Image (spheres, helix red, strand yellow):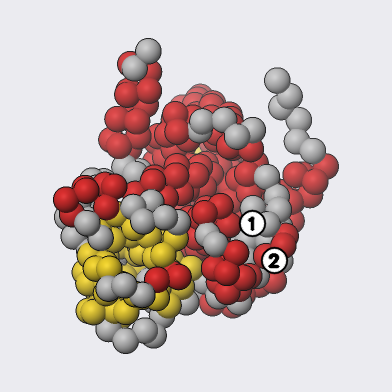
Amino acid sequence: MDFKLSEEQLMIRDAARDFAKAELLPGVIERDNKQEFPKEQVKKMGELGFLGMMASPEYGGGGMDTLSYVLAMEELSKIDASCSVIVSVNNSLVCWGLDTFGSPEQKEKYLTKLTTGESIGAFCLSEPEAGSDATSQKTTAIDKGDHYILNGTKNWITNGNSADYYLVIAQTDKEKKHKGINAFIVEKGWKGFEIGPKEDKLGIRGSDTHSLIFNDVKIPKENRIGEDGFGFKFAMKTLAGGRIGIAAQALGIAAGAYELAKEYSKVRKAFGTEIMNHQAIAFKLADMHVQIEAARMLVYKAAIDKDNHENYDLSGAMAKLAASQAAMDVSIEAVQIHGGNGFVKEYHVERLMRDAKITQIYEGTSEIQKIVISRSILKD
C-alpha cells in the first residue's frame, strides 16, 4: 500500500485548487442566487482539460487515471459543486462511456468535441417512474430499419439545456426487459426534441437541470452505442464509474465546509477566547476531520480499483455512501460552528450544506448503494 501521490497527481490537484480559488470562487454566491449556468467557467475548464481528463489523447482527452480525476473533482467541489457536477457528468458518464464503448466514428464525431469543452454532454437515464429502478424504462426507441424513432420523457437531467449531445437510454424491446434496452447519441436541435423548464433546486443551483421530451425523434442507426440490447449494461457500467465522481464531489463539499469552519474557529471569539479553544468546537472539528479522512480513503480506493481494472462496484458504492454522508454531516456542523453567520450566504457554508444533499440522491441514492453493498457482502 502506497498512500503517496505522484508528482503529476499533485500537480493536477494543485492546478484544480488554484483554478477553483481564482476562477470559481468569484461570483459563486451570485450564480447560486440567480441559478446562473457558469458558462465562462465551463469554457475555461474545457481549455484547461478538466472536461475530458480520462479520455484517450487520440480524441483530445487527457489520458489521466481516475485518481487524478478524483483529486481535481475534490478541489473544484470545495468551492463550487455546480461546476464540479458539470465536470463529473461530462467526464464520468459521457466521455468515459463514449471512449469505452463508442465506435471509432462516434468518437471522432462527438468525443473530440466533448473532451475539449467545445461541446457539453448529458446522460439521460432517469424518468418519472424510473429513477433508482433503471429497468423500468418507459422511453421507447422503435427500430425502423436504418433508424430508430424515440418517444418519452427524461427527468432531472444535468446539463439539460446547456448540453449539445445527449446519451439517452431507451427501451427497444419490452419483452426482453433489461436486455431490450439501448443507448443512443441524440443531438440538441433534432426535430421533436424539446427541453422542459429549468428545475428550481435546493442546491447546485448553478447547474441547469431539466426534463427532456422526445416526440418521434429520428435517430440514425449509427448513433446506437454498442450492439442491440447493450443499453442497460452500458448504463450500469457507466454509472458505476460516475459514482466515484460524485463521491469525490461529496468529499470536496465536506472538505470545503471543514476548512471554512476550522479557519472561522481561529478568528471568532466567545467567552474571551477563540472558539477553537472551547472543547465543544474542538471536538466537532476532530470528528469532522476523521469522517473526511475515512471517506477520502474509500474514494481513493475506489479510484485505484478502477485504474487497476478490478471490479469497483462495491468500492464505488461504499465510497459514495460514506462520502455523501460525510458531506451532509460535516456541512451541517460547519454551519453550527459558524453560528448565526452560518445561516448567512456570504460565509458559504449554508450553500455547501444545500449542495451536499443531492450527493445522497443522484447517480444512485444512498439506499441503492446499501443494496449494492449488501448484495456484494452476502453473496459469498
Cα–Cα gap, marks 1 and 2: 7 Å
Graded by Cα atoms within 10 Å as few (under 14), some (14 to 19) or many (20 or more), the crowding at tag 2 reads some
Graded by Cα atoms within 10 Å as few (under 14), some (14 to 19) or many (20 or more), the crowding at tag 1 reads many
Q: What residue is shown at x 63% (from left), y 49% (from top)?
A: 69
Q: Amino acid at mark 2?
A: Gly
Q: Position of residue 218 (x, y in %)?
A: 32, 79
What label sits on residue 60 in the rendered view? 2
> Looking at the image, can residue 324 be seen?
yes
Cβ–Cβ under 8 Å for marks 1 and 2:
yes
Q: Position of residue 22 (x, y in %)?
A: 68, 65
- The answer to which image quadrant residue 154 occupies is bottom left
The one of 243 and 312 positioned closer to us in this rendering: 312
Q: Position of residue 78 (x, y in %)?
A: 56, 51
Q: Amino acid at mark 1?
A: Ala
Instruction: Give SS at disc 2.
Output: loop
Instruction: Give SS at disc 1.
Output: loop
Asked if 276 appears above or below 76 in the picture, the reply is above
| Number of marks present in the image shown | 2
- The answer to which image quadrant residue 142 occupies is bottom left
Q: What residue is shown at x 65% (from left), y 41% (from top)?
A: 67
The one of 362 and 147 positioned closer to us in this rendering: 147
Q: Quadrant of the N terminus?
A: top right
Sequence-wise, the earlier of marks 1 and 2 is: 1
> Which residue corresponds to mark 1?
55
Residue sitting farthest toward the front? 145
Residue sitting farthest toward the right? 7
- Would residue 275 appear left or right of 236 to someone viewing this image? right
Q: Position of residue 372 (x, y in %)?
A: 34, 30
Asked if 285 appears above or below 230 in the picture, the reply is above
